[in-house]
Image (tube, grey):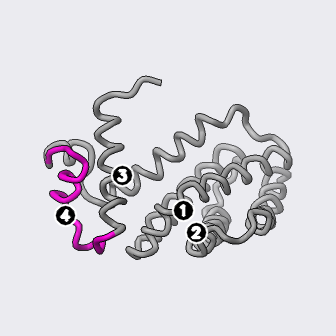
Amino acid sequence: MQYSQGDYSKHYIVEALFKLMESTPYPDITISDIAKKAGVGRATFYRYFSNKEEVVRFFFDHTKSEFAEEQIYRPRCAEDYEEVIKRVIRYIKAHKRHLQLLCKAHLEYIYFDYVDRSLLNLFRSEFDDDNIYKAAGYAGAITNITLHWAKNDCEDDEKVVFAAFSDVTLGGMKKSAAQ
């Protein structure tokens, strides 16, 4: 895949924000700090983002795009969804630092909004189900499972996390698909 200069700039900005969050309280990080750390000008920052929260939202959207590109098939049965859950768990583990920093900065709501929006879209496209309350329930459970695991430095066995994910998602998704 060919990346543009803008793709690189956005990547550097995202990484700069998270690196700064390791040592500086989130409210104290300025756009100038991020731009300097990323090696870009403030105008470049504002070309792509209007504030720090948009940088975090972009991180999740970009991560989701990467995840989707690696998904070579659409899940159609419980076993397929189990494989997707295992991949999600590996992604969470690979990005635990980002989630830990969001928790440290009390920005969990951005992650929840991302999961909530993603699940609502999934319910609409895969299950023809517009029940926003059901999607919100799954989003809350998945957000809590992943954030607790990340806060614990992903030390708990992945099988335990997988079982929690499966209990929450597969049982309900099977019901949605059958309706």
Q: Which residue is mark 2?
A: 150
- Give left or right: position of 94 versus 36: right
The amino acid type, in three-letter code, at marker 2 is Ala
Q: Mark 2 and 4 residues: CB-CB less than 8 Å, in contact? A: no
**Residue at 81%, 44% in the rendered image:** 80
Q: CA distance from mark 2 to mark 1?
A: 5 Å
**Residue at 33%, 28% in the rendered image:** 4
Mark nearer the N terminus (1 vs 4): 4
Q: Which label sits on residue 30?
A: 4
Residues shaded magenta: 23-41
Q: CA distance from mark 3 to mark 1?
A: 14 Å
Q: CA distance from mark 2 to mark 4?
A: 26 Å
Q: Which label sits on residue 15?
A: 3
- Give left or right: position of 174 versus 120: right
Q: Which residue is mark 1?
A: 96
The amino acid type, in three-letter code, at marker 3 is Glu
The amino acid type, in three-letter code, at marker 1 is Lys
Q: CA distance from mark 1 to mark 4?
A: 24 Å
Image position, residue 98 (x, y; %): 46, 61
- Badge 4 marks a residue whose secondary structure is loop
Mark nearer the N terminus (2 vs 1): 1
The amino acid type, in three-letter code, at marker 4 is Thr
Image position, residue 173 (x, y; %): 78, 56
Q: Residue furthest top?
A: 2
Q: Mark 2 and 1 residues: CB-CB less than 8 Å, in contact? A: yes
- Badge 3 marks a residue whose secondary structure is helix
